[in-house]
Amino acid sequence: LYAEPWSVAGTYVYDAKDSLHLMQQFTAVADLIVKDVLTAAGSATPRAWERPGDAVAAATWLLAFFDHLLSWEEKCGGSRFVEILGPTHKHSVGKMFQHFSFEVRAKAMRSIFFDEGVRAERDHASPVITRDDVVCFKGPIVSRRMAEGGPLATALGREKVTVREMELAVTIPEGSRRAKRVRRSG
């Protein structure tokens, strides 16, 4: 549920200076995700999942949460301004995904990018699918950085999660006005 409001917020183009309150909300939600979902109650240790499918579902929704934040930055002119997307933030994408094992991260990414492990019939009007009472995010991934084969997806798919500035850099789409302006001035 934490990812859903950001899918809506991520569709709007805000001025970075005018979105301070929204960024504070993102930071608060990231803190709640760590406390309520990723760690054991009253502890900083990663949660022990009773059912592996629950961990995969949580990882897919965390991917969705960060995907929408990344997309929001990309739509707002290509500058980095969402503070929790910085690699040194206490709830950065790399640090939050360290709560999941390599196997869980790999299954979550295969589930989103390749529809692997999904056996139920899909309702094409809905972005989610239910499997054994577990709701997994089913895409689409909207950020270029989180897209299949993108720098961030590649970093999260490694055995050891290390997300640096390079994986988080906002890329300029080839046909955009800003890309043309950069080529003309360079």
Image (cartoon, helix red, strand yellow):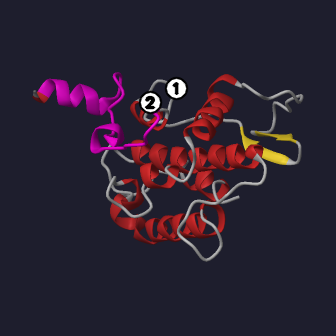
- Closest to the observer: 170 or 9? 170
Identify residue type, mark 2: Thr
Residue name at image x 82 percent, y 47 percent = 134
The image shows residue 127, relative to residue 79, as above or below, that is above
**For the point 33% across and 22% down, which residue is it?**
174
> In the image, residue 28 lies at what x, y percent?
52, 71
Over which residues does the magenta segment extend? 158-184
Assess whether residue 44 is covered by the magenta stretch. Answer: no
Relative to 89, 127 lies left or right: right
- Point out the tag, 1 or 2, that comes first from the N-terminus: 1
Residue 50 position within the rendered picture, expressed as x and y whole percent measured from the top left: 77, 54
Separation of residues labelled 1 and 2 (CA atoms): 8 Å
Write down the residue under mark 2.
Answer: 154
Q: Position of residue 143 (x, y in %)?
A: 49, 37
Q: Is residue 185 above or below residue 10?
A: above
Above/below status of 21 relative to 66: below
Q: Quadrant of residue 122?
A: top right
Secondary structure of residue under mark 2: helix
Amino acid bearing label 1: Glu
